[in-house]
Amino acid sequence: MLTGALAGLMWSKILSDKGVKISFLEFSKYGLITMLPATIVASLSLSMILL
């Protein structure tokens, strides 16, 4: 059972409809892999604009 934002749940449903199984651990791993760089880039961009 996956929980999270609507986009993640929709992504999980699309994969499920296509026969792709993904565990909560895999879902979390891929989420962290994409979230960390995105957060760093966003933070650096904001700090450059605000300083």
Image (cartoon, helix red, strand yellow):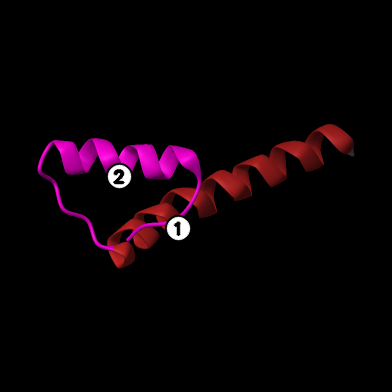
SS label for mark 1: helix
| Residue 25 in the image, given as x and y percentages of width and height | 32, 67
| Residue 18 in the image, given as x and y percentages of width and height | 13, 36
SS label for mark 2: helix
Residue identified by numbered label 1: 32
Q: Are marks 2 and 1 in contact (CB under 8 Å)?
A: no
> Mark 1 is on which residue type?
Leu
Q: What's the magenta region?
A: 1-23
Q: Give the distance between the C-alpha atoms of the residues marked 2 and 1, in whole angstroms.
A: 16 Å
| Res 16 quadrant in image | top left
Sequence-first disc among 2 and 1: 2
Instruction: Check if residue 47 falls in the magenta segment.
Output: no
Residue identified by numbered label 2: 12
Q: Quadrant of the N terminus?
A: bottom left
| Residue 48 in the image, given as x and y percentages of width and height | 79, 37
Residue at (47% x, 40% y) in the render: 6
**Residue at the far right in the pictured view:** 51
Specify few, some or many for label 2: CA neighbours under 10 Å numbering under 14, 14-19, or 20 or more. some
| Residue 51 in the image, given as x and y percentages of width and height | 89, 39
